Each structure stands twice: as C-alpha cells, then as structure tokens.
Amino acid sequence: MARGELGGEDEGAARPVAVVGLGVPAPALHSVLRFFSLIPPGTGAAFVILSEPAEALDLSALLKMLDGAGGPPARIPRDGDRLEPDQLPVAPVGVMATLEGGRLRLSPPEEAPGRRGTVDTFPVSLAEQQGESAVGIILATLRNAGGLGIARQVERVVERHAPAYVVVDDEYLVLNFSGRTGPYLDPSAGTASLNLLNLVHRDLRLDLRAALHRAAAERRPARVAPVRLGPDEDARRVGLTVEPLGESAEEPASFVVLFHDQRSDAAFPPEEPALDPAVLRDELVHRLESELAVTRDRLRATIEELESTNEELQSANEKLQTVNGELAHANSDLKNLLESTPIATIFLDNDLRVRNFTPSVSEAFHLIEGDLGRPITHIASRMPYPELEEDVRRVLRTLSTTEREIGLPEGGRFLVRVLPYRSVDNLVLGTVLTFLDITATTAAQAARRTAEGRARLATAAARIVIWELDVASGRFTHSDGFETAFTFLPPPSLAALLATTHRDDRARLSGALDDATGGVGAPLDIEVRILAPAGEVWVHLSGTRTGGVMLGVMQDVDERRRGEAKQFLLLAELQHRVKNILGVVRSITSRSLAGAESLQEFATRFSGRIDALGRTQSVLANRGTEGVALEALVRDELAASLGPDGRQLDISGPPILLKDRAAEVFALGVHELTTNALKHGALSLPGGRLVVRWRIVNTSGGGRLALEWREHGVRIQAGMPVRTGFGRALIERGLPYDLGAATSLDFEPGGVRCTMELPLGPRVIALDGAPARSGNGHDKAAESAPGSAPGNAGENNSP
C-alpha cells in the first residue's frame, strides 16, 4: 500500500485523498462551523470530529448546525464504517476512536477520564495509518489533548530533513543517538563500549577526533570537509560538524556531532572550469596547507590514541602481573592448606577421576601422586565403602550433599561427606569427598548419652527436675521428666508458678524469688506447697541467678514433709498420752490408797490396775493410730487373768475399734470387772459363767455401742454393796465423763450385770460389716445363760 493512501477491504471503492481529524471542545462549536464554511466542496478528503467527555459536544445540536452550514454531510458512525471522501463522521462521546485499514474503529475507553483520551489516540493512529496524507487539528481549550499525534507528525517531518547526529559527553561517551546513524558507525571488535571514537567508522575516526579536540579547546564549532567513506563502488562523502553544548566554560563539556551525508561522489557537482596557473597554484598551495593541517591534526590524534593504547596496555599488564602474583599466592595457600588439613579429602572430576587429594587421605585410600587422573573406582580402599560410586553419581545428578557413617573393622568410625565441586562461575566440575574421623566423637556421644540416661534415672528416682527462669520475661522452662516426677502440670511462667502455690506459702515464695533475682542476689532455698489435682504437694525449690536467667532444681519432698508432720503429731500424741497416763496413774494411786486396808492390798490392786493400763498402752503403741479392737481388748484382759482356758467365757459382738482415751478407759473398766469376777463373781467358782456381748443400736441421736457384762452362777445378798470402790466409780462416773457413756451396774441374783452405752464417733468406730439394730435396751440372750451355782457373795464384792 502506497504511503498516503487509505487501505481497506473494498479495493474498488473511492478513497479520500487525505483524512482530517478535528479535536473539538464544546466552547469551540462555532469555530467548527466557520472552519467548514471556508472549506470548498468536493475536496476529496474525509473529516472526523472527536471530543472528550470533560468538554463533550452536543452531538444532536452539532449535526443540525453542520447540515445548515453547507459542509460535508455529517453523521454518527458505527464501528467498522469505511471513511469516504467528502464525508463527516462525528465520533460518539466517551469512546476510543482509531483508524485501521481505512475504517473507523470505536471501542470502550481503556483508561479513566482525564488520562489519555480519544483526542490522543485518534491522531496517533491517523499519523501511523495515513502518514503524509494525515492532518490533525486541535481547536482551543482542550488542554494537552491531541499532543501525542501532533508530536508524532512533527517528529517525522523533522527526521526526514534533519541530518543524523550523536550527543556525547566530555569523555566522548554517547548520551543520545538520532535516527539513521547506522551508515556512519562501525563498532570495533571486543568489549562493548559507548565511546564514540570506538563506534564511528574508521574512515571518519581520525578527523572526528581532531574536530572534537579543536571544539573542546576553542569552545566553538569545528567543521570537517567531506571525506570519502566506504569502498569505491559504495563511496559517499560525509562532512562532520562538532558543536559544543553549554553557554559557559564552567559547565561540563558535551558535544553534538552532526553527519552531513553527500550520498556519493556522483552527487557532487563536476569540477569547475580550469583557472589560470597562478590561481591554480595559489589554490593548490592553500589546499596543500589545509591538507597538511588536517594531516597534523590526524597525526596528533593518532599519537594521542597510541599513547592512550600504550597506557591501557601498561595498565592491563600491571593488572595481569598482580593477578599472576595473587594466583601464585593462592596456589601456595591452597597447597599448604591441603598438606596441613587433618581432614582426608579427595577431589574428583565428572568422570570420577582423581584430580587432587590431601596427604591424610592415606587413612582411607591407598593414594599416591601417580594416581592423579585415575578413576577412584580403580584404587583400593582401606574402609568398607561399596556405595562410593553410587553416592558420587547421585551428587553429580542431584547437586545435593550426601553423608554416610562408615564403621571400620578394627572399631574406628568415619563420617563421609560427598558434595559438588563448583568453580567460581558456579559450574559443577566434579565432586569433593571428605573423610572425617569421628571415632572419639562417637565414643564421647555414647558416653554422654549414657551419662544423660543415668542422670535422668537418678533425677526421676529422686523426683528432681532442673528448671530455668528467664528473669526479664518470666518464662519458666524445665528438663524432661516433669510429668513423671510431679503430680501437677509444669508452670509455663513465673506468674503461673505463683498462682499454683498455696496461698499460705505464696508470699514467702514471691519474696524469696525477688531476693534471688533482684539486687540482693541471694540463693533461692525454700519449700512450699503446690496445688495439684490430687491435693497439696510439698516441693523444694533451690537455684541461683546467672546473668539474665536463674537456674535451679525442683524436688518432690511431699513424703518427707508428711512424715515430719506425722512424726510431730506422734510426738504430740505421745506427750498427750503420757500426760493422760500420768493422770490415770495418779487417780489409780489415790483411789487404791483410799480403798486399801493394808499395804499388801494396795500393792495387789495397784499392780493389777497398772498392768491392765500397760497392756492397753502396749497394744495402742503397736497399732499406732489404728486403735484397738474391742473384742481383742476384752479377750486379752480376761486371758491375762484366766490363762488360755476360756470355757467359762462367752464373748461376741460386731467389729468395733477403740482409739486413744476410749481404749484406755474401756480397758480399765474391763479390768475392774474382771478382777471383781475373779475375786467375788462368776470366775471365782468352777460353775460360774461370764457373758460379754455388744451390738450397734440406731437412735435418733445417731449410732451407739451397747455392751452388756453379765455373770451367772453367783449368789449375791440382797441390796447394794455398802462401799463404793474404784471400779464402780470408774464405771458409773469415769466412762460417762470421758466418753459420754450411759452406764449401769446392778447386783442381781446370779451375779453382776453391767451395761455400757456410748456414742459412735472418732474414738469409737464401727467397722464395715457391723450390723445395726433399731431401738434401745439390752440383749436378752444373756438371760438364757445357765442358772446360778452355789456360792456366796459378801458385801465387799463391789467392783
């Protein structure tokens, strides 16, 4: 398609000779009418009117006015309409209009209003499609609108007529190229450079260097007469102009270099007619002088270029010598490093051939200097490493590192590491194998693991954990085994530790921690109670601050503290019992003295009562806090007087446990009844019989123990005894006072009948399985006992 013609699908249709794009704002509506009134009809050009939404036209009003102005027929186009001569399409507002193949293209805007609009895009596409047959007109008030298209057209008009040029700085480095500089540039081979003297064609290089020097020295334009450029068949003559930029000598120097192309030798006018010899001679002299000046400038430029080249060569030589020295030094360092390192190392290439190795590799392979270049698989190994080739090829394939531990038959152990060998350019040129003797390390690790295991067992057995407290953050950490050593969860922080501490110990622990972590720096040593799900747990905390942390141990001392508490209670109980026993002994002594008629009688009674008290205390001491079974107490007291023969006895009742004072008082009461029965009652006669029975009775006031002591086979005189002895006083007054019991002592025909009824509680305990009965009264089973045997009881048979 020829430049300036409209292309399109309808090749036979008439094409406009030009396309005129008009950017029109609403205020310029009358200017449009005046414009078309001045355009003669039948110009053959196509017109397109465009506007932006910010200053949109009233299209309906515009169409009516254009129809009355006598200009080309106006219409609102559709997407794809072909532009025709002497037609006036008015693009809708808010769409992007472009020109493509002679047809008008309408599309939604791609950018927000206020940025690039259709008044910009249409002139650009108009300039690209129509070239010289494009006309762009932007009427007033559209700020910046259409600038892109106009700038494109102006740039083409300037580029067609302006000479090619290059802008360089004071070091002749190119800052800007214009178009069409290709024929004048011929870059030198080698490293890329923006220095114009290296880029310009060699036929222009010397003249350009001279012109640049002259322009820089004189601060005014320097011109070079056209010189021949290129081979004979393609020769052209090119002139040069070097013009300094900047208004003062203080500004950094920069230059614009213009290339004046005279095309070819044939383009120059023929030589003028010959002049007279004098003129020719003067002209020849002038020309020779000019050529001599040019030659001198070229020679000076050549000398400067040669000097610059020599300086560059000298600098390169110095750098090369420096690099060679550094390389030799690096090689020496590498040689000394390889010879001094205790780590056995082998360097292999990509074909598994030995490139180098350290002397200590002899511990792993039989390598000598003559093995360089041999495959490693051809060299005998001192260690069992059949996977060598597989590991090396895997590293070359995956470029990752492989590690493997190898044990020697004699007990040693090596860590083999295979990694890629990389050059300074990050190229993989082989592999590196290192053999590290870890025999001592492995033994030390095994010993450490054994020691740690023993330490864990010891701390677990002693129920000890090691803890660490970060003073700044309050974070609390601990060693393994906390959950095993303690019955509570480990506190994550100091605040959590204090929160789980017993409230009676919390202030003591907080103060001790403040002293240990604060300025006092005192060591922590304290025992506190920690609240656990199963109850309180005593722990011992000790530690010392080291820098910003505090290290210490925590030990479970709950059993010791509870043992100490129990021991304290036992001691207190012992003291209490001793006081009680002394009181009882004192009471027994005074009562025995008061009722005894002789010293012998006092000794007998006192000894028996003390023995009974001793037996009870012995049982209580052996049973500890468990107490004494009622049945055992009764049988032991009777067995102490009767011996193993128990044919006269009938003892029965549910399991009852007596503790502390209840056992002592009950034992004394049974002793008094037994002594009376032996002296005056059923146990003093061969035919006598003693029945002792007890049961549990439920009353409105709670459970009670009801015991009956009944003797059979004894004749007793009517009436009560005249004298009240120690035993009767103990039963009728001592038991009610000490145990809250209700007692009775009757002297009935056949023998003594004694009843005791006392409440169940912490000192009188009914064990599991003891049956309970409702109501009150005494067991009638004793009434069925055998009848009375012959015998007499005097007035002194009072217990």
Image (cartoon, grey):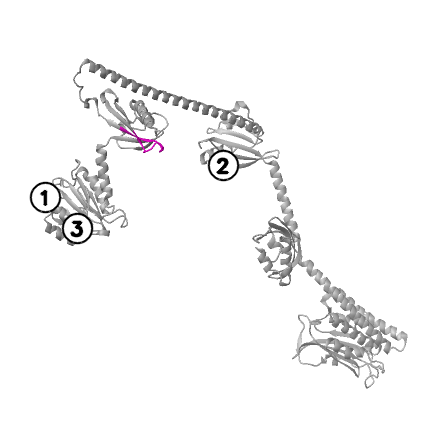
- Identify the residue position indicated by label 3 in the image: 29
Q: Amino acid at mark 1?
A: Pro
Q: Reply above or below: 244 against 51.
A: above
| Earlier residue among tags 3 and 2 | 3
| Earlier residue among tags 1 and 2 | 1
Label 1, label 3: how far apart the Cα atoms are: 19 Å
Label 3, label 2: how far apart the Cα atoms are: 79 Å
User: Magenta part of the protein: which range?
Assistant: 243-258
How far from the left and from the top, in percent, is residue 95? 22, 49
Q: Reply above or below: 256 against 137.
A: above
Q: Reply above or below: 520 against 10.
A: below
- Identify the residue position indicated by label 1 in the image: 40
Q: Amino acid at mark 2?
A: Thr
Residue 18 lies in what quarter of the image?
A: top left
Label 1, label 2: how far apart the Cα atoms are: 86 Å
How far from the left and from the top, in percent, is residue 41? 9, 44
Q: Reply above or below: 696 against 152.
A: below
Which label lies toward us, 1 or 2? 1
Element carrying mark 2: loop
Element carrying mark 1: loop
- Identify the residue position indicated by label 2 in the image: 401
| Crowdedness near tag 2: few (<14), some (14–19) or many (≥20) residues, C-alpha within 10 Å | some
